[in-house]
Image: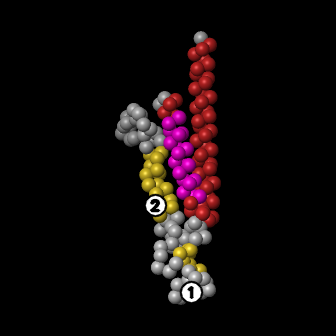
Amino acid sequence: MSISDIFSIAGSALNAQDMRMASIAANLANADSITKPGQTPYRAHELVFQAAEPAGSNYGTSFTGSMADPGVQVAGIVQSNAQPKRSYDPSSPYADSTGYVTGSNVSQTAEMVNMIDSSNAYSASVAMLQQASRIDQQMITSFQAT
């Protein structure tokens, strides 16, 4: 694995976490949204990650027969299967015939936990990039000294 592969891997992780943060922000922005009767309420978006090879990589099957794990990419975005929130508010113009208002299925608590997790993953990738850069600089310095 070359140093450029490390930068590519960390970059893919940063991109994936950036997309995850955008999804979390959209979910939190719609957490308290409600819908008119008969309409579909906002459903929380969840990202699906998968292993990916960086562009131009020479990765392949190792001697054990398994694929290397060189990076991450967003395979897709799915909607949460959680049930929408329903609250009794017969005075609301959005209430159905039984007096219930249907809202999004976003759990603000779960989204905040996801945000902390994503932030930590992003920080770890930045730390890896910084360490790889230091190693790269040390290698260049050691070649110049000889």
Residue 124 lies in what quarter of the image?
Answer: top right
Q: What residue is rendered at 59% in x and 58% in y?
A: 25
x and y, in percent, of residue 34 in the image: 56, 74
In the image as oriented, which residue stretches furthest toward the front?
Answer: 93
Which stretch appears magenta? 7-25
Q: What residue is rendered at 62% in x and 39% in y?
A: 127
Q: Residue 140, relative to residue 93: is it above or below?
A: above
Residue 12 showing in the rendered view: yes
Closer to the N terminus: mark 1 or mark 2? 2
Separation (CA) of disc 1 from disc 2: 30 Å
Residue 107 showing in the rendered view: no
Q: What residue is rendered at 62% in x and 48% in y?
A: 120
x and y, in percent, of residue 76 in the image: 44, 55
Q: Amino acid at mark 2?
A: Val
Q: Is residue 15 magenta?
A: yes
Residue 100 lies in what quarter of the image?
Answer: bottom right
Q: What residue is rendered at 58% in x and 32% in y?
A: 132
Residue 65 lies in what quarter of the image?
Answer: top left
How crowded pointer 2 is (Cα within 10 Å; few <14, some 14-19, many 20+) is rated as: few
State the mark number for residue 99.
1
Report the residue marked by disc 2: 78
Q: Amino acid at mark 1?
A: Gly
x and y, in percent, of residue 143 in the image: 58, 16
User: Could you tell me what secondary structure mostly forms the magenta stretch?
Assistant: helix
Camera-side residue: 48 or 30?
30
x and y, in percent, of residue 94 in the image: 56, 80
